[in-house]
Image: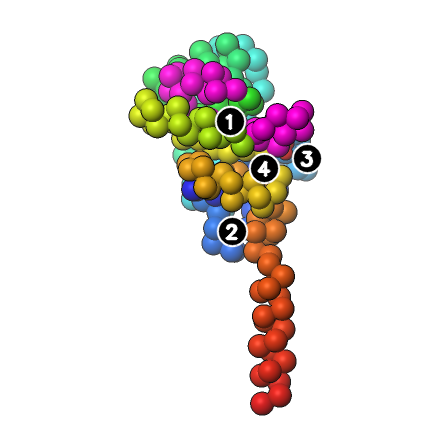
Amino acid sequence: MKIFLDTANLEQIRQANALGAIEGVTTNPSLLAKEKGDWRKTVRQICKEIDGPVSVEVIATESPAMLAEARDLVKIAPNVVVKVPVTLEGLKTIKELHLRGIETNATLVFSANQALLAAKAGATFVSPFIGRLDDIGHDGMQLVQDLVSIFRNYELPTQVLAASIRSASHFSQAALLGADAITIPLSVLLDLTKHPLTDIGLAKFLSDWAKK
Ligand code: G3P
């Protein structure tokens, strides 16, 4: 499972990158809006910091304008992946970008049907939003399981990118289910390192050593 960081904050990216686990970044308009300064400059800096894919979302809602934005986004850096919401206009856009060899991340995916259509249109990644489904009383992780099965059934090359991740438990469940990739906030990444027995064990080793 590839691990991406879900942020547009450079400091967080540097902190996560130092741990050696991060293979890409996903941003969205809400995350980029939180960062000060010119968003293009921020995206360029993120793309320099990270070797892997950096998802940047289009803002337009009509396909011709989405395509124009996408063409602009991919000029920023070669590792930009164009994030496109799965609407009718979004699907048209994904198809056109696929024909032009531009990688896409189909976002705001809340059903298997949306994901299957995005895969047929040629999306590189589909992003099921786990936490937001859980928030409304659905089982977000069930969607990951469904997408992994469906894509395997039909040998579709589109990768399942588990998104809207809120906990370390989401992370391990997505890995067990065979998600191709996951995007997590820094807080979840830091939680993954924690175990009380590690802390207790280390304290014991150090106190025993101090008695030598
Ligand atoms: O980047 C998309 C997704 O991961 C958003 O997560 O926490 O805003 O539902 P969240």
Q: Which residue is mark 3?
A: 34
Q: Which quadrant of the rendered structure holds the N terminus? A: top left
Q: Residue furthest left?
A: 155
Q: x%, y% of residue 92?
A: 44, 11
Tell me if residue 181 can be seen: no
| Ligand 1 neighbours mark 4 (CB distance < 8 Å) | yes
Q: Residues within 10 Å of mark 2 (few under 14, many from 20)?
A: some
CA neighbours of label 3 inside 10 A, class few (<14), some (14 to 19), many (20+): few
Q: Earlier in the sequence, mark 2 or mark 1?
A: 2
Q: Nearer the viewer, mark 4 or mark 1?
A: 1
Q: Position of residue 93 (x, y in %)?
A: 45, 14
Alpha-carbon span between mark 2 and mark 3: 20 Å
Answer with the quadrant where ligand 1 appears in the image. top right
Q: Give how far apart the Cα atoms at labels 3 and 1 are.
A: 29 Å
Q: Position of residue 164 (x, y in %)?
A: 59, 33
The alpha-carbon separation of the residues under discs 4 and 3 comes to 19 Å
Q: Any magenta on residue 175?
A: no
Q: Which mark is residue 54?
A: none
**What residue does disc 2 label?**
17
Nearest to N terminus: mark 2 or mark 4: 2
Q: Earlier in the sequence, mark 2 or mark 3?
A: 2
Q: Secondary structure at mark 4?
A: loop
**Within-10-Å neighbours for mark 1: few <14, some 14–19, many 20+:** many
Circles 4 and 1: CB atoms closer than 8 Å: no
Q: Which residues are magenta?
A: 111-140
> Rounded to the nearest whole Å, what is the CA distance between mark 2 and mark 1?
29 Å
Position of 185 with respect to 55 (left or right) is: right
